[in-house]
Amino acid sequence: MVKMRFWKMHGLGNDYVVVDNRKEEIREHELQRIAQTLCERHFSIGADGMLLIYDSEIADVKMRIFNADGSEAEMCGNGIRCFAKYCYENDITKKNEINIETLAGTKKVWLNIVDANVQNVRVDMGPPVYEKQFIPMLGDGTCINEDLQVGDRTFKVTCLSVGNPHCVTFVDNVKNFPVEAMGPKIENHKIFPKRTNAEFVQALNRRELIVRVWERGVVETLACGTGACASAAAAHLLGKTDAKIVAHLPGGDLKIEILKSILMTGPAQKIFHGILF
């Protein structure tokens, strides 16, 4: 691999290594290994994932997402905000409204720009999908507030896709919930053929949720944009919250609105930049 510049970025503590790969200096067969190497926190840059920029034939720019374990993800809510900031501030596109191609389809984002810097980003995440076959999840129909056997415990879960798979569980006290024990068991449950993200959620009131997320291919992260959106959609569907909510995650807050699509607004920040050898 030749020398390449990168930015280390985060959205509410959900952190990424962002690389402009439009010239494809990182070759396809190297992507999984390089993602694992760069995301290792003790011997490398360290991150929850790697974001790669490519040219797009159908949008302004294309985003590819690799988790810390080297698996490729369809969509990432915190990542797409960081991606949009990188593209604007590096003159890849100077629009304040950007269409971004992802494996989950083309997503539109709106940039809030102050003194030539992107402060926060609003993302149209698209509509939630509840049909099992499209999550994907084994079986027919939907899984809305249904029992899921996890080891010797049974949870009421709501499963959906917001571009990637999610399994949402509402609990009474999320702070003390054993996410590290239950998260990987749900992630790797046989009912999810491509694994799943697992959300553990407490509804504080009609306008606020506390959300903890065990991310597929990562661990529990400080924030997960798609996880927050999935939690908000499930909470609204079950009548627990209104259409506009604030999701409180360990790394900070996201504003989410449930319309025909899910709209998510949150910050994106650059931590540092460097050169890959």
Image (cartoon, helix red, strand yellow):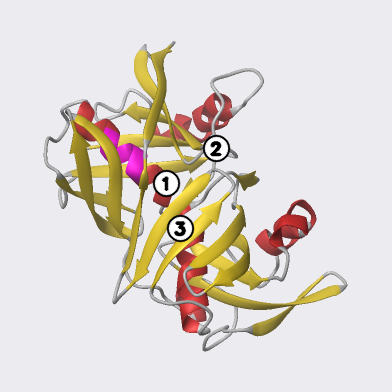
Pick the quarter of the image with the C terminus: top left
Residue 192's x, y, as percent? 62, 68
Q: Write down the region rendered in magenta.
A: 81-85
Decide if residue 268 is on the left or right side of residue 149. left
Nearer-the-camera pick, 4 or 146: 146
Q: CA distance from mark 2 to mark 3?
A: 14 Å
Kindly identify which residue carries mark 2.
48
For disc 3, the neighbor class at 10 Å (few under 14, some 14 to 19, many from 20) is many
- The amino acid sitting under disc 1 is Asn
Residue 226 circle label: 3
First in sequence: mark 3 vs mark 1 = 1
Q: Residue at x 14, y 43 (%)?
A: 96
Q: Residue at 31% of width from left, 43% of height from top?
A: 63
Residue 64 is at least partly visible in this image = yes
Q: Is residue 104 left or right of residue 157?
A: left
Dot 2 alpha-carbon crowd within 10 angstroms: few under 14, some 14 to 19, many 20 or more:
many
Mark 2 and mark 1 residues within 8 Å of each other at the beta carbon = no
Per the image, is 272 magenta?
Answer: no
Residue on which the image places disc 1: 78
